[in-house]
Amino acid sequence: MNNKIVTAKDVAILAGVSPATVSRVINNDKRISNETTNSVRYAVNKLGYKVNPLARGLKTNQSMTVGLIAPELANEFYMNIAKGVERYLRPHGYTLLVCNTAEDNLIEQDRIKHLRERRVDGVIIIPTTGNGEAYKSLYHKKIPVVLVDRKVSNYSGDIVLANNLSGAFNVVSKLIEDGYQKIAFIGGNADVSTASERHQGYLKALKQHNIKRDKQLEVFGKFNVQGGYDAMQKIWQRNALQTKFDAIFIVNYFMHIGATKFLNTQLNMSKAPVIASFDDMDLSPLLSFASYTVAQPMLQMGAEAAKLLLDRINNRNSRQNKTVILPTEIVAYRR
């Protein structure tokens, strides 16, 4: 059996080009003609040539890895963003390292330190807190950063967002147009930009439709199943067995699950409330009481973040920061 290691020089000989040209084709140099590119790729496939990432990294001073820091790996929303990032990075030869913070800023700082030590070429972050001070250590190491989903203070850089305020406004308006006037609100930590913007959208919809705000119908909790359960229980207890509300707007998928879990324990409902929430997931149509969800372009958010990051890696001296805001869509579930 021939165990000879195929080198770039072997590829160059078969393709009839120089080893330097082989390197340029592998690194997607746009200056190389299509004819030469096709010849090199044919030789690469025929010989089974594999790039040695360690040797490549030593030569280019790049690790060809990108870090992604997410608040919760069990969250389908964040993993769909990660999928969008990975899909975009893979054809460019990058490997994705995913870290979990469990919505804990101390863990987030530790993960940032870990990625710095791994010498990643860039980091995509879904922030845990509303403050960007922790990311300055990456800037000092000249490691590009792109934020996704959440805005933070003390941060000047690239970011990809969904239009949270518009999505919340539109879905609450939809409930009002369907005849619901007493709409409760279940929200998250106001320090997190998505929670704040979705609350603003809820209030804007009430005001535009001349519905008086009732703070007794608004409860805030943690962005998880238990947080949704506890918030729904508080609203229920405050409002005398549902006499004061007939619909609910919930700011994310996991709180939606928790609220539904609580409502399913109540056997004495004279009339079940309907629920509108953010995040259209695979199991959303199966949740009791679900009427509408706000679908975010999760894969596109990940891909846009990866694109911005690679642009930043390839143009480290650029001072022009970019903000990408993507539209949301309402999905209806008829009951």
Image (spheres, rainbow, N blue to C red):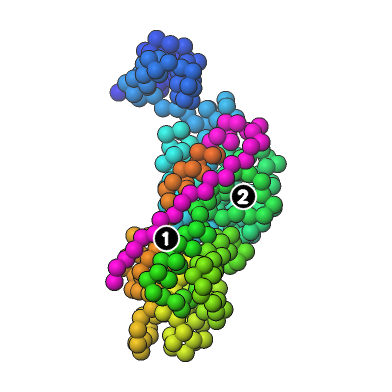
SS of the residue under disc 2: helix
Q: Earlier in the sequence, mark 1 or mark 2?
A: 2
Give neighbour class at mark 2: few <14, some 14-19, many 20+ (Cα, 10 Å). many
Q: Is residue 260 left or right of residue 321?
A: left
- Residue 29 vs 102, above or below: the answer is above
Q: Secondary structure at mark 1?
A: strand
Per the rendering, the mark at residue 112 is 2
Q: At 45% across and 62% down in the image, what residue appears?
A: 170
Q: Which residue is mark 1?
A: 294
Vertical placement of 54 versus 291: above or below? Answer: above
Q: Cβ–Cβ below 8 Å for labels 1 and 2?
A: no
Q: x%, y% of residue 154? A: 69, 52
Q: Give the image location of residue 52, x and y in percent.
A: 47, 28
- As rendered, which of 305 and 103 lies closer to the eye? 305
Label 1 and label 2: CA atoms lie apart by 31 Å
Q: Which mark is residue 324?
A: none
Q: Classify residue 105 as left or right of residue 305.
A: right
Figure quadrant of the C terminus: bottom left
Q: Using the image as rendered, state which of residue 247 and residue 237 is in the foreground.
A: 247
Q: Which residues are magenta?
A: 310-335
Residue plotted at (58% across, 59% down): 193
- Percent coordinates x, y for residue 5 in the rendering: 40, 22
Question: Toward which corner of the image does residue 269 lie, by quadrant?
Answer: bottom left
Disc 2 residue type? Ile
Question: Left or right of 228: which side holds 106?
Answer: right
In magenta segment, residue 253: no
| Residue at screen point 64% across, 37% down | 320
Name the amino acid type tagged 1.
Answer: Val
Q: Which corner quadrant holds the N terminus?
A: top left
Q: Quadrant of residue 212?
A: bottom right
- Can residue 195 be seen here? The reply is no
Select label 1 or label 2 by which is in front.
1
